[in-house]
Amino acid sequence: MPFSNGKRRHKSPPPGETGQEALYLKSLSERQVQRHIADLEKAGFVKRIERTVAHRGKISNAYDLSGLVDKLKALEPQFAEAAEKAKALRKDVTKPGYRPAAKPTGPK
């Protein structure tokens, strides 16, 4: 099924990408991606590893994401707590005869 990013039409997204992911990824210029990576480096989430080859010089960079992984591990308990609260709320709503508490209508 064809999809478009506003510039050109594509027959199908590349393997591993949904249509929406492909549209989003193709909407960023190379320079925008470079700026986002630089911001992540400044924040300490990403570390650039420059790679070179003796006879060719610099080649593409590799990135160490351990800073991002450490931050996500630190945040995981908060996400787990929020997920448990949401699960409890969904369970309450699905109980037969559930009626939410009446909201105050204002001063009388």
Image (spheres, grey):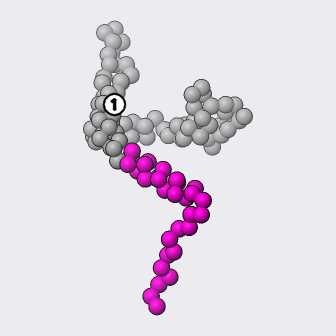
Q: Amino acid at mark 1?
A: Leu
Q: Residue furthest right?
A: 1
Across and down, in percent, residue 74 comes to 29, 41
**The N terminus lies in which quarter of the figure?**
top right
Across and down, in percent, residue 22 comes to 57, 36
* Residue found 46% across the figure and 91% down from its top: 108
Asked whether 10 falls inside the magenta stretch, the response is: no
Q: Residue furthest front?
A: 97
What SS does tag 1 mark?
A: loop
Residue matched to label 1: 65
Local packing at callout 1 (Cα closer than 10 Å; few below 14, some 14-19, many 20+) is some
Compared across the picture, whether 89 is left or right of 35 comes to right
**Across the whole image, how many numbered discs are drawn on residues?**
1
Residue 20 to residue 13: above or below: below
Q: Is residue 41 visible?
A: no
Residue 70 to residue 77: above or below: above
Compared across the picture, whether 22 is left or right of 61 comes to right
* Residue found 52% across the figure and 57% down from its top: 92
* Residue found 67% across the figure and 31% down from its top: 12
Across and down, in percent, residue 86 comes to 47, 52
Query: Where is residue 99, by image quadrant?
Result: bottom right
Q: Residue furthest bottom?
A: 108
Magenta residues (range): 80-108
